[in-house]
Image (cartoon, helix red, strand yellow):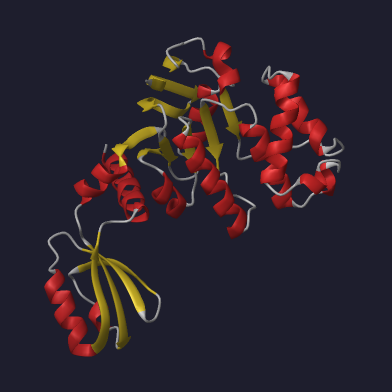
Amino acid sequence: MKVLEVENINKSFGHFKAVDNISFSIEEGVIFGLLGPNGAGKTTTIRMIMNIIIPDSGRISLMGNSKTRSTTDFIGYLPEERGMYRKMKVENLLFFQTKLKSMPKKDARKAIDLWVERMELSDWKKKKSEELSKGMQQKIQFISTVLHRPKLLILDEPFGGLDPINQNLIKDILLELKSQGTTIIFSTHILESAEKLCEEIFLINRGKQVLNGRLSDIKKSFGRKNVRIEYEGSDAFLKSDQIKRYDNYGNTVEITMAPGGDIQKVLKDAVDGAVIHKFEIMDPSLNDIFIDSVRSSEDEGAVS
């Protein structure tokens, strides 16, 4: 079942076109990456899905219903711009959120107790929001997003402000929710997280679609042109016209080959000047795909 369908939506603010005729759909139980550089149109797209702003044209359908206002109780939304009622106690704040989602009082109390315990915040339930650390506040906002068991979960930079332990906790919860059929839209600049979690991605730049599809298929279409070398000695082999770009960390370098570049020649040059501990041909990372696709789209825009 398609949980969300976005068809040819457009949105302008004055003479600025923030979203330009984009379309995508998401099936139930999929983690979907909505990606793009700053100012690409991601947040505008999310706000149209949430019915915060209305598209100038096009259609958005949630669970087969184009009247999205009537389906917002089935959505959990964590915006990038966080906000809490600072003087309100944590349990009162969470209970208020459940009322906004029409959650029965008995179910709400039970869910609040379950989630604050799972997020290791039981001792802070009676505290005011302003007494919590930034990371704790972030966890409370995440709880308020998932309390009502939404069918569609929209997360804009969900790992911001969290240490690695709590990032891992949120990751495990997202995978658990996915296994239970929750559909998740994951918008982030942390491409490493998106690459590990997302099955499908939609890349937007300057309001226009750049890439859309299964991440595994997109990686195959880019080909295996990345190399990682662990070495000791001279890095002179990196000064080669076979190489498009590289990130050198001293004893490890990640290389993107130039179009038509000869990987065997790079290996030979490396062996001639350094001791090679590891030479690995890799699939392109989401970071490489992101950079190449955004640059290509901007070059095409400059030409047109």
Instruction: Please identify the quarter of the rendering in which residue 9 is found.
Output: top left
How many numbered callouts? Answer: 0
In this rendering, position of residue 217 left or right of residue 61: left
* Quarter in which the N terminus is drawn: top left
- Which residue is depicted at the point 62% across and 58% down? 163
* Quarter in which the C terminus is drawn: top left
Nearest to the observer: residue 255 or residue 85: 85
Expressed as whole percent of the image width and height from the top left, the position of residue 131 reads 84, 48
In this rendering, position of residue 64 left or right of residue 99: left
Above or below residue 248? Residue 158 is: above
- Which residue is depicted at the point 36% across and 39% down? 201
Expressed as whole percent of the image width and height from the top left, the position of residue 135 reads 70, 51
- Which residue is depicted at the point 64% across and 39% down? 142
Above or below residue 26? Residue 293 is: below
Nearest to the observer: residue 154 or residue 179: 179
Above or below residue 210? Residue 21 is: above
- Which residue is depicted at the point 48% across and 18% down? 55
Expressed as whole percent of the image width and height from the top left, the position of residue 48 reads 52, 23
Observer able to see residue 168: yes
Expressed as whole percent of the image width and height from the top left, the position of residue 257 reads 21, 64
Above or below residue 168? Residue 117 is: above
Observer able to see residue 82: no
Instruction: Please identify the quarter of the rendering in which residue 126 is found.
Output: top right
